[in-house]
Amino acid sequence: MSITAEFRTHVVDTQPLGGCSPEEILASVERIVTSDGFTGSAQLVRFLRYVVESCLGGQAGLLKESSIGVAVFNRGGGYDPKTDPIVRVEARRLRARLAAYYETAGATDNIRISLPKGGYAPAFGRLQYVSPEAEAAGLNRGGYIWTAAVVFAIIVAAVGAAYYRVKAPERLAAQFWQSLLGGEKPVLIVAADSGLVMYQDLTHQGIGLSEYLTGEYRTQAAGSGSPVTALAGRRYTSIADLEFASRLSGRPEAARRGVRTRYARDVRMDDLKGGSVILLGARHSNPWVELFEKDATLRLAHDEASRVFRVVNRSPQGAEAAEIVVSPEELKKEIYGIITYHANREGSGKVLVVAGTSVTGTEAAANLLLDPERLQPWLEKASLDGELRGFDLLVRDRNLAGGAPQAEVVAFHVERLR
């Protein structure tokens, strides 16, 4: 059955993604790449998977010749599409192979995937049966038949417009997470050391990064016979940190390289130099944060003796306070969380710190990050000419029975251009 004949007896749904679910589209991709026309071409398989997965992840607008050359065809950072046409050449091959597939093995497929000329964002369509009577009354009225090419061009335009209009929050969120998860190495998530928090609270002794790295405090505790000895050596972290890591690993941007989750005590300096890093918790629970506060305008500081938290604002704007002091009693009623996002000065990639005055505060900040609708306005403020600048964000809310509601943003700072 030819493509033209198939379109004459079917119409394409003009819903976003062509009326197809992501699961149906991915299943269709698997049928295509395991067909005879694709099994011998690993390069075309990578190309097709990449553009489809990027589109489903809300990154269709980022599918450029330069980025595809680096991600799919292993071109280096200095890749120049003007002198190396690999992407254009392989795009033509991919279009031809897809057309051949739908003429042969995929002739009866209900889902159609194409790569329209003039770009690298794929288009999707669902074919629905139209009776011969309906076809004669509708598609063939006036004595002519719309060809597959004309119908498909109209559908692609309609689907593209609807998709980009509806998916704006997801596109911005995808751009943000791609900057962290899309590097050449898996992003490193450093989970907080809850045992360290309990140890410091019971001993009223603050532990800095240098002491944390050497483990001196654990040695001293072991020799003291104190009841807190067990805390110094045990490994505890919050379920909120693990849930965040789990949800992040499920994002489409993590599909290529994945994520690594490490307990704070197991991290070494070299681990922080290979790519992007996500640190969960303030210094009190994750001493590694100390290394990455140079660019941050918002910090959380904890006094072990008084158990008071301070929200330090190094660059107050408008009516913002330079410091917010939160006593132990106030911590039971009010929570604060911070998000800081800057370049990784210890290596390559980006650094994201998600911290709070309590586990609930960290969870409130994490919930904002993982909600594209709530994150959208702040990413828009941080965007300049399509690029995301570093930013710092502070949220506040009531502590409702240990839960993290949708906290309000009370401070937002964008990194100035250097």
Image: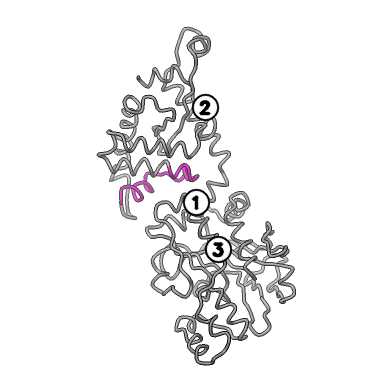
Q: Closer to the camera: disc 3 or disc 1?
A: 1
Q: Residues within 10 Å of mark 3 (few under 14, many from 20)?
A: few
The image quarter containing residue 300 is bottom right
Q: Nearer the viewer, mark 1 or mark 2?
A: 2
Mark 3 and mark 1 in contact? Answer it, CB < 8 Å.
Answer: no
Residue corresponding to mark 2: 13
Q: Amino acid at mark 1?
A: Gln
Q: Secondary structure at mark 1?
A: helix
Looking at numbered disc 3 in the image, what kind of residue is underneath it? Arg
Q: Identify the residue at horizontal 42%, vertical 38% (top origin).
A: 27
Question: How would you classify the magenta stretch by its main secondary structure?
Answer: helix
The tag on residue 416 is 3
Relative to the observer, which residue lies in front, 374 or 318? Answer: 374
Q: Secondary structure at mark 3?
A: loop
Q: Please give the residue where the numbered disc 1 appears in the rendered image.
A: 175
Residue 66 lies in the magenta-colored region: yes
Q: In the displayed image of the protein, which residue is found farthest to the left? A: 40
What whole-number distance in Å separates the C-alpha atoms at marks 3 and 2? 46 Å
Question: What's drawn in magenta, residue-wise?
Answer: 53-74
